[in-house]
Structures are given as C-alpha cells and as structure tokens.
C-alpha cells in the first residue's frame, strides 16, 4: 500500500517547518537568546544524547558530553550557515565531535571506534563552499532520479533525521519496506554520484 501524494506533501511541509523552526532557534541563540536556547535544547537534546551515547557507550559520560555539546552550540551558533540541508546535520556533527573528543581523552586516540569518524564543524572557506554547493546540486539531481516516495524517504531519514518508523507511518507502508527503499535508494545514489 502506497502513501497518498497528499500525505507526502504534508510530511514535506512538516519537515520544512521543523527545519525552519530549528534554524530560527539557532539564529536566536546566536543573538544570545536564552529562551531560544532552552527551546532548542528541548527540541534536540534527545537526539543528540543518543548520538553521544552511541559513541561513548556510557550514560553518565553521554550526559556530560551533552552538556559540552550545548556549551559548544551556544558559543558557535553564530557560525551556523543555512545551506539548504537540515540544521540537525550541524547539531549532530557538533555532538559527535564532542563525544569523540571525550572518548579520546578517556582511552586515547587508538581506542576510538573506526566508525566514529571525526567530522569537522562546517565552517567552509570560499573554495570549499563552492565545491560543496556543486556536490549538493549533483546529489539533488541524483535524488530527482529516484521515485518520489523513495526520494522523500531518503530526505526524511538522512537529511531531516526522521526515524524509519516515522517514515513508514508517514508513507503508509511497512517498516521493512522503508528499509528496503532506503538501502536500494542509497545504492542508486552512490552509482549516480560516482558517474
């Protein structure tokens, strides 16, 4: 059973509204707005805590890392640039980097898991920004080659941070169908990007 086009449009509208709301909160945090900071924490801390916990594997340390994350967000909010991608990508990058820093401090660099790649906080120079813009445009063109429901699933899960279960519900399909769509779509995207 396929989700209706209206359901897909509603989900896209909701996703865009959520993205815009988070971007607005970050902009207000950059201006020193504590109420916006509290709202940003309430809206994003669960997801960022999960990132810290997945890297550190320790609840207490993940909570401490989360505090570091929000101190970093408070200080760096002015450097966040709206770039068409989900602001959660930036927040997740900050969280992952802080958790990795803590892991390195705890056990030394050699103990960092291979999948815990240190991602820099995005503050690109002009050339890097131009290259990323070109890559982003190419990726968007590749996404346009996917069926609409598959492209919506990829955007929702990988760019907007939706869970597989939320996507399955929004699309009106079983969870395993969403997993299959995503796996196959990522393979098609990789082939397209590599062309």
Image (cartoon, rainbow, N blue to C red):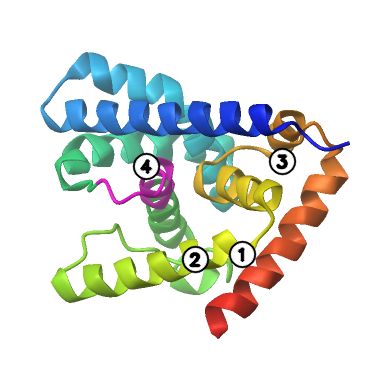
Find disc 2 in the rendering and name its residue.
141
The kind of secondary structure element at disc 3 is: helix
State which tag comes first along the sequence, 4 or 1: 4
Of all residues, the one furthest to the front in this rendering is 5
User: Mark 4 or mark 1, which is nearer to you?
Assistant: 1
Gap in angstroms between the C-alphas marked 1 and 2:
7 Å
As drawn, is 106 to the left or to the right of 147? Answer: left
Q: Nearer the viewer, residue 3 or 92?
A: 3
Residue at image position (76%, 36%) is 168
Count of picture labels: 4
- Look at the image and give the residue range highlighted in magenta: 82-94
- For residue 28, which quarter of the picture? top left
Pointer 4 or 2: first along the chain: 4
> What is the x, y in percent for residue 179?
79, 51
Proximity of marks 1 and 2: CB atoms separated by less than 8 Å: yes
Can you give x and y, in whole percent of width and height, for residue 157 in the image? 61, 45
Q: Nearer the viewer, mark 2 or mark 3?
A: 2
In this rendering, position of residue 131 left or right of residue 28: right
Q: CA distance from mark 4 to mark 1?
A: 25 Å
Q: Which mark is residue 164?
A: 3
For the stretch drawn in magenta, the main secondary structure is helix
Pointer 4 local density, CA inside 10 Å: few below 14, some 14–19, many at least 20: many
| Quadrant of image for the N terminus | top right
Circles 3 and 4: CB atoms closer than 8 Å: no
Please give the residue where the numbered disc 4 appears in the rendered image. Answer: 87
Q: Please name the residue shown 55% across and 83% down the image.
A: 194
């Amino acid at each position: 059973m396929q989700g209706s086009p209206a359901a897909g449009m509603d989900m896209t509208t909701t996703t865009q509204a959520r993205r815009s709301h988070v971007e607005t909160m970050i902009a207000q945090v950059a201006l020193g707005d504590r109420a916006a900071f509290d709202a940003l924490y309430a809206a994003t801390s669960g997801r960022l805590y999960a990132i810290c916990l997945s890297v550190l594997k320790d609840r207490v340390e993940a909570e401490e890392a989360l505090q570091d994350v929000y101190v970093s967000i408070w200080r760096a909010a002015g450097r966040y640039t709206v770039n068409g991608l989900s602001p959660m990508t930036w927040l997740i990058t900050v969280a992952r980097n802080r958790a990795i820093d803590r892991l390195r401090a705890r056990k030394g660099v050699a103990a960092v898991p291979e999948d815990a790649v240190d991602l820099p906080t995005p503050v690109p120079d002009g050339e890097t920004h131009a290259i990323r813009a070109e890559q982003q445009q190419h990726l968007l063109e590749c996404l346009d080659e996917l069926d609409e429901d598959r492209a919506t699933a990829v955007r929702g899960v990988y760019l907007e941070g939706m869970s597989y279960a939320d996507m399955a519900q929004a699309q009106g399909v079983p969870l395993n169908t969403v997993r299959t769509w995503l796996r196959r779509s990522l393979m098609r995207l990789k082939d397209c990007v590599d062309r």
